[in-house]
Image: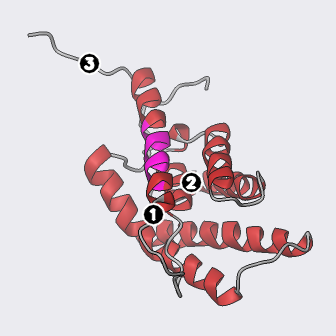
């Protein structure tokens, strides 16, 4: 029987496709009408969690263009101002990507803190942008609850990504990244 070998280049593209597929599944479940009454609380924004987790763990699996396309699609589907959340998320992910090298050797709570900062940057930047353009914003308590729920969901999502997909932190000796992306 022939043995299947996965080259670093094919793993890169497979993981990028998995990132997009996971985001599409999250969007599908968010669009399903599971409740008929409005909620009094806000759940976590799992698309932001996925973007931040992939960015902090393996930045090459979530390039800025792909993150922007995924979040832009979510903007359109969730009827948010098109491109606003995408722009803020790409900026936050690029900041976190810049910080990711320093987080490689540090324990998980430091990574969680960095992810929490990223969530606050995304949701706070989105809210501030809405206010600057005089667009109605959700109540501050709803945004704070969403930020807290998103930060608390980060370890669960990372644990699932690590257990199911093997998405671990990129170590200094990892050679499965491409020089040219």
Q: Is residue 159 above or below residue 69?
A: below
Residue 176 can be seen in this image: no
- Magenta-drawn stretch, dominant element (helix, strand or loop): helix
Q: Decide which of 150, 7 is in the foreground and name it.
A: 150
What's the distance in space between the residues labelled 2 and 3, CA to CA? Answer: 29 Å
Q: Is residue 19 magenta?
A: yes
**SS assignment at label 2:** helix
The residue segment tinted magenta is 18-26
Q: Is residue 106 magenta?
A: no
**SS assignment at label 1:** loop
Report the mark closest to the observer, 1 or 2.
2
Please report the residue visible at 63 percent of the width from the left and 59 percent of the height from the top.
78
Scheme by which the image is coloured: secondary structure
Local packing at callout 2 (Cα closer than 10 Å; few below 14, some 14-19, many 20+) is many
Residue placed under numbered mark 2 in the picture: 100
Q: Which mark is residue 106?
A: 1
């Amino acid at each position: 029987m022939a043995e299947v070998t996965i080259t670093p280049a094919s793993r890169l593209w497979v993981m990028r496709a998995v990132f997009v597929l996971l985001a599409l599944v999250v969007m599908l479940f968010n669009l399903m009408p599971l409740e008929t009454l409005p909620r009094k609380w806000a759940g976590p924004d799992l698309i932001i969690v996925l973007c931040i987790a992939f960015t902090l763990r393996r930045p090459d699996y979530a390039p800025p263009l792909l993150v922007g396309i995924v979040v832009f699609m979510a903007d359109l589907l969730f009827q948010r101002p098109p491109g606003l959340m995408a722009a803020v998320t790409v900026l936050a992910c690029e900041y976190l990507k810049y910080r990711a090298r320093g987080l490689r050797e540090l324990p998980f709570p430091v990574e969680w803190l960095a992810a929490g900062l990223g969530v606050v940057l995304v949701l706070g930047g989105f809210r501030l942008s809405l206010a600057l353009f005089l667009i109605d914003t959700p109540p501050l308590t709803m945004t704070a609850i969403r930020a807290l729920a998103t930060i608390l969901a980060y370890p669960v999502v990372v644990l699932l990504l690590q257990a199911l997909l093997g998405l671990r932190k990129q170590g200094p000796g990892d050679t499965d990244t491409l020089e040219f992306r």
